[in-house]
Image: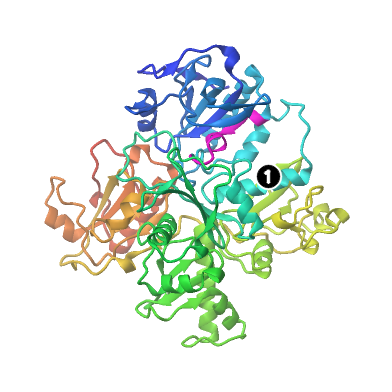
Amino acid sequence: MYQIEWVGMTRNNFQPGSPDRIRMIVLHATAGSYPGDFKWLRQGGAPGREVSVHYYITKRGQIFQLVADHDIAWHAGVSRWEVDGRTVYGCNEVSLGIELENRNDGRDPYPPEQYAAALWLVRELVQKYHIPPNQVVRHLDIAPGRKTDPAGFPWQPFLDEVFADLTAAPSLPVGDRLRQYMLDIAYRAAGSGLPSEWPFWSHAHAAKLGMPVASLVARPLAPRPAAAPNDRERALSLPDGTRYLVEVYARDALCAEVGPDDTLRAGTPIERLSTIPASPQRMALLEAIFRAVDPVNGFQPGWAFHQYFLRHLDTLGMPISYNHRLALTAGLSFACQHFALDSLCSPVGQWQVIYRLSELRQAAAGQMILAGLSRERADQLAHLLLDDLFALRTGRRYHPKAALIQYALTEELGAPLAPAETAVIDGVPVALMPFALDVVACRLPTPDWPLERPLPPSSPFGRLTALLSGLRSTATGIVRLSCLNSHHLPPSPMSTVPLLGPARHGQPLIDVSLFAGDGEVRRQPIDTILIVPVPGPTSFLLPNAHIDARWHYYIDHTGMVYRLRHERFVARAARGVGRPAEHLDQRALVIAVEGLLQHSSPRLRSALQALVHLLRRHFRIRVDRVQVLEPAASVPVTDRE
């Protein structure tokens, strides 16, 4: 049982109302962190951006009430929805608003404690006010051209749990519900959500562009404080002053111009990046698309990689990763960037030599010869790229014989986009996983079946049945979103191998130090680790961090570790902190972390602890030489020796 703590507003940025007005519930994400975003909301926003909300739920599952249910909070803005059979313009007057503490970048997780609290609260409100399923919505549903929140929230499973045993509404055919789950996981992998009747998806589906890989939003013009706006704006401003919605799919990017209110009007033409001629508009779109996945480098028209991309966009697809460094052997490193349909790599310093992952796999199989690579070396490099791709996108190791991986490679579904998830649909456990060109699903023996274990041969789910007659790939027991039958769920794959490779412990390190330049070489040995909390967000801080030589490493709020500068060069984050700067510059390794440690996520703390442990062992640094530079009391960083 949860408790709701009444706190009220410090400014009366709401209107009086009555309980009979409540006919819908809207979920939001704050695009910030507690307590800053909570204080911002409680004080009613800022001049010119007055806001309020009924409830706020922290990542720890605390529920605060700021506005009484019967009063009208200002949370929905310009919005529209079908409510009790009529179209309502401006949903504030008929809705309750719930804010979830979350960065709203599609990567920040919603912890189980927060999810459970939101589930309890929405169930309580649904029962109290008799809200039907189609009137529990996200902000992105009622303002689809403007808003993205709550980005990355597992919407379809949440709705199913909210209305479990609460409604007698007729259920959809099992295949239709599976389709909803597949689309939900695909859009969450892109850091967004799929609004109903979204024209971008309809256009992409008709043009066979594959799954969404990014939903672009405007980058902040300056580092945001902890007190952030209550949601994320979608429209991007181009150099000529026009504003565009941009959504990136595996094979191409789609864009549409919007008016001053950032809404997408019916009949607005949707353009494809590949058909836009060379122009400042096209260059701005390319920069936004690359910057969304690679804040450090963005789009570099002079780079061989990106020139190659422009010539082979149709077979490479859109970018899905940083341009970073991978070490094959001691002294042999490659620059690498992953795209939706293929990956590129170049030997460091030989930028005109470009290898494609697809070609490396052919060379490893003896089907072609690549200059400068033996068959064995091509196989090693292909495996390195695949292992890196799966680590970055799924958190698992590449396992070439795993059922879902083998299926995706054989069917040429492109890159994996997110970890596999398990859902229970009509009582049947199913594993779902999005790839660049499709989403795949297979049946499981139990909801908690480990995906790195083979399915039991004795399981009834391991036998072929007549359920999938007429569907593609029935012999594998794997069904695809593009070929989904609306009546049945797939049986389990007939296989003695696991569905996926083992989980990779710890976050992979993204090495972008290759692009930092040389800088000042150390004159003294390393004996200190400095931990520097910085306000974030990542997308604003990283582009210049490695050029300005501020830090050696950066850890974002998700726990991802970026190596920005080689340790043999000096970083200058120690300047101006009341200590002998020259001494610290010469002797210190500098680790920047996003946000104050006392408010950081467990994943960030775990990644920081692991990195400090690794660096201490490698450079033989004493524990008392690990220092945290921050204005407030810090959480101690300890080692697990």
**Residue 507, horizontal then vertical, whole percent:** 46, 55
Q: Magenta stretch: residue 264 in it?
A: no
- Tell me if residue 145 is in the magenta stretch: yes
Occupied quadrant, residue 86: top right
Residue 373 percent coordinates (x, y): 49, 85
Q: Is residue 640 visible?
A: no
Q: Nearer the viewer, residue 201 or 36?
A: 201
The picture quadrant where one finds residue 424 is: top right
- Most distant residue in the right direction: 466
Res 26 → quadrant: top right
**Color scheme of the displayed model:** rainbow
| In the foreground, 502 or 152 | 152
Q: From which residue to which does the magenta span run?
A: 134-146
* 338 to the left or right of 165: left
Q: Please count the marks in the image.
A: 1
Looking at the image, which is closer to me, 361 or 578?
A: 361
Residue identifier under label 1: 180
Q: Is residue 95 left or right of residue 299?
A: right
Q: Residue at x 60, y 39 (%)?
A: 155
Above or below: residue 347 compared with residue 515: below
